[in-house]
Image (cartoon, rainbow, N blue to C red):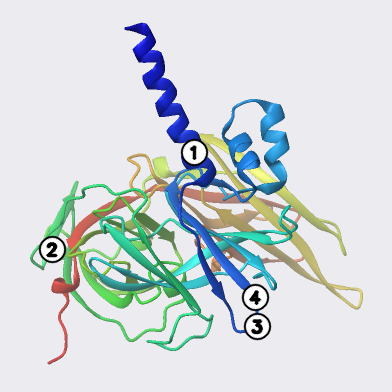
Amino acid sequence: MKRRLLLFFAAIGAVVILWALFGGQTHRFTLADGTTLTVHAVSAGVSNRYCFGNPAKRLAAKLPWPWAQKSAANAVLTAPVDGRTNLVIWVTYRGTAPRAGRPFRFRCVHDGGTNEFAFNGITKYGLPSGEAGAAFYTAFWPRRSKRLTLQALEEDAPPGAKPLWEVRVANPLPLDYPQWEPEVLPACRTVENVTICLEQLVPSETRLAARSAWPPLDAEAVRARLRVTRGGQPDDDWEICGVCFRDALGQRFQQLRRLKSRSNAGMHDLDFVLPLLAGERAGKLGVAFVRAQGFPTNELFALPELELPAAGQHVSKTLRTNSPFGEVSIHVIAHTIHVIAHNYGFDVSVLNRQPPGHDLAASDARWFQPLAATDDRGRSYSFAAFGPLDDIGSATFHRIRVSADAKRLLLTLAVTRMILVEYTVGRESMTRPK
């Protein structure tokens, strides 16, 4: 019996090794400039690596011992790990390889329809074969589909353009997912004594910077019209600080501040893109609100006093204070406005960066808001916001101009609670002009 088990496991091991060495089908293409491109594999996972070497190196790359990994290292390419499940296309170039650090356009034909995506890319030059290896990867892809046709496109290719090359593969990570249904609008959510209603979704005519940040590339620009009331009356104490979206495939996106919104008499118009794949009926739209005024006293904090710089100098300092919600810190930069021996005052900027990895859906989510500053002579200054400074909108500048005879500043910061409301919406939710 033991001998049979040993033979069985030995046979399984042999099959695994033979597949690692010789399994899989490659696809070879000749590009317009004569470069030979070979598609070796498509994989999916949180951690993705591939060995482009000969059979001995591919076997070594699968062994756990350091000496084996070292012998295969010059043929191994690892896709960056970002904690998400990425779809990765592994290719080699004999000739001109693509430059990494820019998005690569792919059209994906799948069971639900067709979408265009921007894949990230990483390139490794000088493989033992003399080729360059590349990995194209994305965390947003049609996971429900059993097969995928991936078509590489020119960066500025018009709609319907012929692909540079294409490959049809089986979904490397097929799973069953539910199909969500959109809810009827208007839909209302009440948090404590504040009611927020999504009244309507309509096509947006605004050109959105967020379009390139949320996939797919062909996502539709949408305007959400929301109403905020308290006791049945319009409530103007709130503003939108972020938006997020998640689909039935487990894919989730969020942005802080990097969006266009307008408000008046409790009404808010929010422009965003609807990152819904073809064939998906609905996803969960989340909108985060924070107080814009009327802060309760337990949300207001004074930061340590800031010494203003001498004439012609500047100061850059991180101010910290403790709160019931954890440590609060902001970075302050102050410099004198000095022209031809005359001091015109101080330009004080507060870099307001939200906590890294800020999750809008977290129950303890808080928003940092610099409100005002008071100098040593008792004069008050109100901050004006500028920004955002990064692609996810998590950092903004707030600025004030301080009088020339001031010596010190005391800054007041609001650490206010976020309210996240979520609605199930889809293309069927849209009200379109007739």
Image disc number at residue 344: none
**Residue at mark 4 to residue at mark 2: CA–CA distance:** 47 Å
**Disc 4 residue type (three-letter):** Thr
Residue 307 visible in the picture: no
| Camera-nearest label, 3 or 1 | 1
Label 1 secondary element: helix
Which residue in the protein does label 2 denote?
182
Query: Crowding at label 4, few (<14), some or many (≥20) Cα neighbours within 10 Å?
Result: some
Instruction: Say left or right for 18 vs 281.
Output: right
Q: Nearer the viewer, mark 2 or mark 1?
A: 1
Residue sitting at 36 percent across and 77 percent down? 218
Q: Residue at x 59, y 63 (%)?
A: 397
The residue identified by callout 1 is 18
| Label 3: element kind | loop
Q: Are marks 3 and 1 in contact (CB under 8 Å)?
A: no
Going from the N terminus, do you reach mark 4 or mark 1 first? 1
Q: Are marks 4 and 2 in contact (CB under 8 Å)?
A: no
Position in image of residue 86 (x %, y %): 44, 52
Distance CA(mark 3)–CA(mark 4): 6 Å
**Relative vertical location of residue 64 with respect to residue 37 in this rendering, above or below:** above
> Which of the two labelled residues, at mark 2 and mark 3, occupies the earlier sequence position?
3
Kindly state the secondary structure of the residue where label 2 is placed: loop
Q: Is residue 54 left or right of residue 414?
A: right
**Badge 3 density bin: few <14, some 14–19, many ≥20, Cα 10 Å:** few
Q: Is residue 377 visible?
A: yes
Residue in the foreground of this view, choosing between 107 and 120: 107
Q: Which mark is residue 33?
A: 3
Image disc number at residue 35: 4
Residues tagged 3 and 4 counted as in contact (Cβ below 8 A): yes
Circle 4 SS class: loop
Choose top left, top right, bottom left or bottom right for residue 170: bottom left
